[in-house]
Amino acid sequence: MAEILTRDTVELNASFADRDEAIRRAGELLVENGCVDERYIDSMFEREASVSTFMGNGVAIPHGTNDSKDSVARSGLSIITVPNGVDYGDGNVAKLIVGIAGKGGEHLDILQKIALVVSEEENVERIVAANSKDELLSYFDEVE
């Protein structure tokens, strides 16, 4: 996990006006760190238009469509904590935004590892309350 999730792709204590702003920022972190090109962000919005990426437990996992493979340079994750939450539509509030870009077939493996961590509501609360990027990263180190 350490090779795809770094301090540079983590943002703590963010606040967003709406879901779209949160998705855009998750994509921008992936772009800024060389994981994807700008087109990938558009693909994240395409995915969201077809099916919500809100997963429950206050977690949203925005990611691109299957057609966006050529926008992915290398696998990567962006993680954003939103302690006050962001309205994700349909009455859902996301406090943890996890942007995913998978190179080749790595996408599903990455999703499975993330799902292991965020399946417990207590884990999500600990992650959202993290006081430092290193503390947040430590919760994901346990998933190797």
Image (cartoon, grey):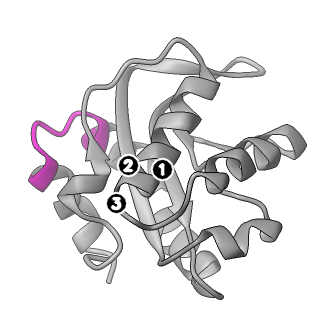
Which quadrant holds residue 108?
bottom right
For disc 3, the marked residue is 33
- Left of 44 or right of it: where is 122? left
Q: Residues within 10 Å of mark 2 (few under 14, many from 20)?
A: many
Label annotation for residue 79: 2
- Left of 35 or right of it: where is 38? right
- Residue 111 x/y as whole percent: 57, 69
Contact, mark 3 vs mark 1 (Cβ under 8 Å): no
The amino acid at mark 3 is Asn
At x 64%, y 87%, the residue is: 104
- First in sequence: mark 3 vs mark 2: 3
Bounds of the magenta segment: 126-134
The amino acid at mark 1 is Val
What residue occupies the far top of the structure in this picture?
17
- First in sequence: mark 1 vs mark 2: 2
Q: Is residue 114 magenta?
A: no
Contact, mark 1 vs mark 2 (Cβ under 8 Å): yes
- Residue 61 x/y as whole percent: 58, 50
For disc 1, the marked residue is 98
Q: Is residue 126 above or below residue 3?
A: above
What residue occupies the far front of the structure in this picture?
38
Which quadrant holds residue 102?
bottom right
Real-space Cα distance between discs 3 and 2? 13 Å
**Secondary structure found at label 2:** strand
The amino acid at mark 2 is Ile
- First in sequence: mark 3 vs mark 1: 3
At x 44%, y 56%, the residue is: 30
Question: Which one is closest to the eye, mark 3 or mark 1?
Answer: 3
Q: Is residue 50 above or below residue 31?
A: above
- Residue 88 x/y as whole percent: 65, 25
